[in-house]
Image (tube, rainbow, N blue to C red):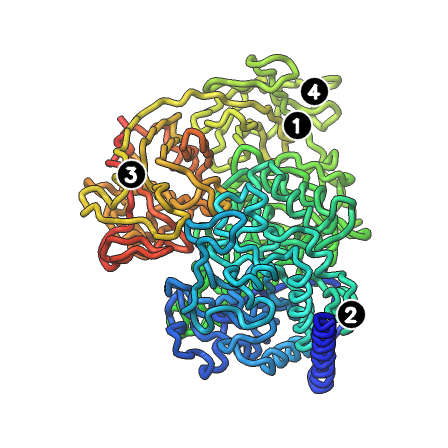
Amino acid sequence: MNAVRLSLRRCLALLFAVGSSVGAGGAAAQALKLHVPSPDWRDQIIYFAVTDRFADGDPRNNDFGAGEFKAGDRTRFNGGDLKGLTQRLDYIRGLGATALWITPPVANQWVEPSGQYTGYHGYWTEHFKRVDRHFGTLADYRRLSDALHRRGMYLIQDVVVNHTGNFFTYRNRWKAGDPAHGYEPHDRTAPVPRPTQPPFHLNDPRDPKQRRAGIYHWTPDVVDYNDTVQELNFQMAGLDDLNTENPVVRRALRDSFGFWVREVGVDAFRIDTAFYVPPDFFTDFLHARDRAAPGLAEVARQTGRRDFHVFGEGFGIDRPFDDTQARKIERYMTGPGGQPLLPGMINFPLYGAMGDVFARGRPPAELAHRIEATMRLHARPHLMPTFVDNHDVDRFLAGGSEAALKQALLAMFTLPGIPTVYYGTEQGFTQPRAAMFAAGWGSGGRDRFDTSAPLYRYIAALAQLRREHRLFSRGAPTVLKAQAAGPGVLAWRTAHEGQAALVVFNTADRDTLLEDLDTGLPAGTVLQPLFSLDGGRGEPLVVGAGGKVTQALSARGGWVWRITQERRASPDASLTVRLDPLPQGLPGQLSTVAGDFVVSGQIAMVTGAPGAAAGSNTSPSHGSVKRLKLVLDGDLSSARDITPGPDGRWQAQVDTSTMVDPAVRHRAVVWAPGVPAVGVDFRVERAWTLRADLEDPAGDDQGPRGGPGTYRYPTDPSWGALRQMDLRGVRVSTAGGALRLDLTMHDITTVWNPQNGFDHVAFTVFIELPGQAGGSELMPLQKGLLPEGMRWHRRLRVHGWTNALFSAEGASATAEGTPVGPAANIAVDRAARTVSLTLPAASLGRLASLDGARVYVTTWDYDGGYRALAREPAPFVMGGGDPERDPLVMDDTPVIVLK
């Protein structure tokens, strides 16, 4: 009976607290504009800011004496706060953004147990219903909400439901079924040793009452993300995993986040680490019928929001033409019975494909597949936020050019989804969490709120394009053409309610032929220019015979044309080109060749055209066309001239020296302006030649060759004794001007679920090209010089989440050089402990041979930059070296000469 009375008193107290919150929120709403109707989220443009790194509006809340603050230090609080965001809203609105997404503003663990890093980012919660003192007060947060709403903008709060901060660990002593065994509290972390908010303070399983409460899973770190039990129940990087199956936890989380909707007027939530709680959690989170702590959809409805948006983070990036992660993402939006779960999820697979195609030179066919898969697999693609970079990945410009970034942004703004601009992208940032204000880390010592910056103006123009033409936020794209053999043409048509547009890219760094684009439109249809990457709109296009468009596209171009009802006469071609069948292959089948081959044919007047011989289309008269062009895979820059003979006959040799992948479908096209193009598809199956085969000693991953041999791995258990940076063998092969490296390792791990198939090691490959002048002897960001007088012309940096290729132009000790492409093709064979990196000839200057080239390979690790080195190792820091002068090389090869 006493227990019943106690439970009743607790319920009444909770109801009173909720009622008080509603009352307080109502009073605040009378003075401030906190509660506004929901927008149509399809039409919004999001600006995402890491609060600590954006603007310091109140220096008084920077430092609370726990060693957590140091302006200009990447690992510490830098001073950004809610007041700073409020003061800079006109800057954000001027970019075209209509919604502001901020990192969690809640009270956090300030310093993690090792003392190396701080919770400036907001994802290490200790109290879900308090504003962290570094960010300001509840009143500051309300004023931010009010200021947004008065500008017609909306507030998105990042929330965490999977974990709290790192308040306990098991190291390697965890025992299943006995959470007290090996439990080790972190009782000296600042500002508190454990969460202060009930019930999350019940985090010690050594206490039988706390253990019975079951608020946490009390588990060690995930070591295998392919194990569903670990993924849902184990800790991520030491963060204490909440038992989200527990009704008490679910109620506390609903109550906590309902508070921010009522009291501040938050308009949407972004759910951090959504993959690490079961999908059915979100049905309860949004729709629970609990008067004391209702689902968030009901809380939103009570405050006048009929379309409260909630979108989750599912960090999953698919390999080309695979949809495994995309299907997993959809399972968090749509249940097994077709019922809706989360309204949206961030479109990580689209992000991966855009980076690969625009920044790293992969074939546009890979992005075309991703666009088609997005529309096919997802029930609500228009409600899925899209992005080109964010706080958890490299900046786009860390491995891609500005021209490539502009293309990716144009794609994002013209495809379904909610475009999300990460702060600083508009200022050309290359560091993932650099500060916008002068005192912050990575700012260069100046404020970065420059509204005249070229990328700021460019993004504002894209926002205007999307705002003025709703077909880009609500329409459906249909891919019309996508280059499959390398960088080049990508085109789609998008349509909505009688409006349509054509979006075209050339992703190559050279002029490309758009050949016979089948628009599906009547001949003579006029395409009016809406947007062009060169800053102008360009000239109208007129669709040719058969609904086709053939056009020379400038390097790294991007265009948007509006499809009109206007018709003009399209010129009739008076000439035709005939292509003879290839001798290779069988009739009707794709030809496969082993090397160079010859194409031939004839050019002639079309029957009935002026000047044509009666009854014939094979007249030797071929008008004013003196030369044709042989174009391989759309590349106009290296097209060969063909001179027809007096009878119109012609032939040309196809150079296949740069074609190395037997799975790629290539195309040879014969064309001249005003003459319809004809082409033939083929594959090339070339032999690779082994040029070097080296064994590397076991256990020499202790620093560079000739060094002291004292380097040690970080102490975090995810490294353990696995020695992921220990090279055991290197095989170097070439095929013409292409290069392949097969790197055998001591071990390959995927502890952190890396998209490239391996983690805890970064490979940096330096390549000196034969017969080339210039180059650099410096090892950018690695504090070293190349051995044996080597100078690099190409430098490849690859780790679990990045794949970037650079030329030596602009390289220095602190600058990586100029991004070039295509980047490497990556293949991982975990059973053989081998990572294979293949660079096509186009990546290496299209040389016919690599004889005399020199190659040097190093290993280290990378996390938004090469991992730090200190005299003593720490959980995420290498040890055993002088951080001021020693090179960041754990293992390396000798300089390999290709003879």
Disc 1 to disc 2, how far (Cα)? 77 Å
| Amino acid type of the residue that numbered disc 4 sits on in the rendered structure | Asn
Q: Quickly name the residue at label 4.
A: 617
Q: Quickly name the residue at label 3.
A: 856
Foreground residue among 15 and 96: 15
For marks 3 and 2, the one nearer the N-term is 2
Image marks 3 and 2: residues in contact by CB distance under 8 Å: no
Give how far across and how far down residue 674 sits, in percent: 63, 35
Foreground residue among 823 and 72: 72
Q: Residues within 10 Å of mark 4 (few under 14, many from 20)?
A: some
| Amino acid type of the residue that numbered disc 3 sits on in the rendered structure | Tyr
Image marks 4 and 3: residues in contact by CB distance under 8 Å: no
* Secondary structure state at the residue bearing disc 3: strand
Looking at the image, is mark 4 or mark 3 nearer the viewer? 3
Q: Quickly name the residue at label 2.
A: 291
Q: Residues within 10 Å of mark 2 (few under 14, many from 20)?
A: few
Give how far across and how far down residue 484 sits, in percent: 57, 34
Looking at the image, is mark 4 or mark 2 nearer the viewer? 2
For marks 1 and 3, the one nearer the N-term is 1
Looking at the image, is mark 1 or mark 3 nearer the viewer? 3
Identify the mark at residue 184; answer none if there is no mark: none
Identify the mark at residue 575; answer none if there is no mark: 1
Please give the count of numbered marks on the rendered protein.
Answer: 4
Residue in view at x 74 percent, y 19 percent: 614
**Is residue 454 at all visible to an observer of this figure?**
no
Vertical arrangement, residue 202 with respect to residue 60, above or below: above
Disc 4 to disc 3, how far (Cα)? 59 Å
**Is residue 525 at all visible to an observer of this figure?**
yes
Give how far across and how far down residue 510 sits, in percent: 49, 42
From the viewer's perspective, is 859 left or right of 199? left
